[in-house]
Amino acid sequence: MRSSRALYLFAAPALALYGGFFLLPAVQGLRYATTDWDGYSPAFHDVGAANLTDVVTDDDLFRHALTNNLKFLLVVVLGQTALALLLAVLLAARSRGSTWLRALFFLPTVLSSVSVAFIWKFVYDPNFGLANAVLRGVGLGRFESAYLGNEGTAILWVAVAQIWFHAGQMMVVYIAGINQIPGELYDAARTDGAGRWQQFRHVTWPMIAPATALVVAYTTLQSFKAFDLILGLAGNPPRSSLDVLATRIYSTFANSQLGYAAAESIVFMVAIALVTFLQNRAARVAHG
Amino acid sequence: MRRLVLAIYSLLIVVPLVVIVGGSFKTTADLFASPFGPPTRPTLDNYVTILAKQDLLRVLGNSILVVAVSVPVTLLLGSLVAFAVARLPRWPSRILFGIFALGLAVPAQAVMIPQYVQFDRLGLRNSLTGLMLVNVVVTLPVAVFILAGFMRTLPVELFEAAEIDGAGSWAAYRRIAVPVSAPSLAATAIFLVVMHWNDLLYPLLFIDDPAKRTLPLALLDFQGEYLTEYPLLFTGVVVASLPMVLAYAFLQRHFVAGITAGAVKG
């Protein structure tokens, strides 16, 4: 048992820091959420559950942010998963070319969110941007758009940037999944006369279900929590048409409504827990 | 068909990057005249402007310092916890692991506000020390997750042999666990480096003093200052990204392993 005691000592410094600077503030947040504190005044009032009820029932900005979160989530999860899978299927077989392309497609992942935001800010610039320039160049000028300038759809263009940013990362997860499928399964499928599409449908797709679950789960969380990229594109202070919950909370906080921001954080956390729960349920149903 | 899809996606990655790098050598007028073409009169003015005006060398130094301290500390603390998780009896091990796993589920935005208050009270706000501390705290759960995941797969006999020889847990950790876990330590390290280097949230919250900004924060500030002076923004992107892109070019496989492990576990 002597060695057990030593092991607790090993964990002690990490536990102390993590307990003191993560778990403790997490609990304190619950307390702030019941006040109207601005963050620096010595005096503040206890408002009970008023903040929470306001957030949930009576806050258009928060609701707008939540709607944006869900739009963003849907586009990113569907788009990124499909794209990552497509690229992985095309690049799973090792060859010189595929190694290069994998490296290239993964590259955006190592950039910072702010860098990616600036790149896409330029792509979407209505006057000088790449996207419109390309459209004009190929004779599709009538599809020119203001992208981030359109209230209702701006968030969807951010979703495209997010997919560009992280699809390569998820492609790698899929490639790992595909490479674990035993080659005999494909041999058997081929002997049965299965074409490429049938091989994908009856061998690859069912065999990579775990990878899909992983990709969808990670993408869901990542896109629900997205902050840096959106802030980079929306500017600081963020423009509200691009608001998602994470940037909304930041704005409230920067606006010296600390108590209210804490209440928003709680709702945000519950929303994440709910999304995760629903997703687990969906995954279980899908697996029978 | 395969070639077409791959070619299109390659262009989608390459074209914006080439435009950014090329644009950093152009004047604003040049860029708008021909965004795609090579710079007609390449200029280093943007780099000079940014390095001089924005105190970028200092900002770079701050980023390097923050990463150079927080990553090794997180690795050390995380690997100690992981070792304890791997060696403790079943229930204490599960509880210890569970406490850290909790941190993976809680998003930063839910804790950042009370953290801000706490760091402010302790005088740790607006300081690089505070930034390092919060970096360590928020990434410990991921580090524990990856490292414990690895150490738990190691055969118990490996550690027992060392401990029976009278070496004690410390020696078993230092001489056996750490060397054997080298690949997973390396993957974790890369994940942490990328994460801390690119983090915006905490510098945004914690740092007011322009002299203490890190790269992503300084970059975000450019936007306010230069607005649509794209060549200057592009130059900022190039300066901020170059270290990571170069490291990626040389350590490609490790980067992919590290970031993917972090993604899968985090």
Image (cartoon, coloured by chain):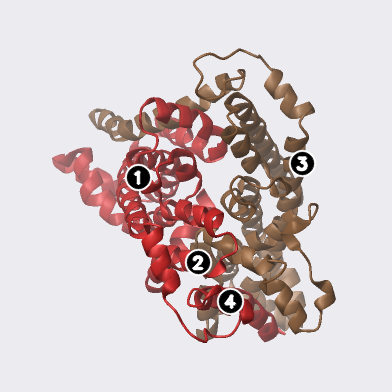
- State if disc 3 and disc 1 touch (CB < 8 Å): no
Of circles 4 and 3, which is in front?
A: 4
Tag nearer the camera, 1 or 3: 3
- Measured in 3D between alpha carbons, the distance from the residue under mark 1 to the one under mark 4, in whole angstroms, is 46 Å
Q: Which residue is mark 2?
A: B232
At numbered mark 4, what does the secondary structure look like: helix, strand or loop?
A: helix
Q: Nearer the viewer, residue A91 or B65?
A: B65
For the question of whether residue B10 can be seen, the reply is yes
Residue at image mark 1: B74
The residues bearing labels 2 and 3 have C-alpha atoms spaced at a distance of 33 Å
- Disc 1 to disc 4: CB gap under 8 Å: no
Query: Which three-letter amino acid code belongs to the residue tagged 4?
Result: Ala
Q: Which residue is mark 3?
A: A64
Question: Which mark is first along the chain, 1 or 2?
Answer: 1
Label 4 resides on the chain identified as: B
Label 4 Cα neighbours within 10 Å, binned few <14 / some 14-19 / many ≥20: few
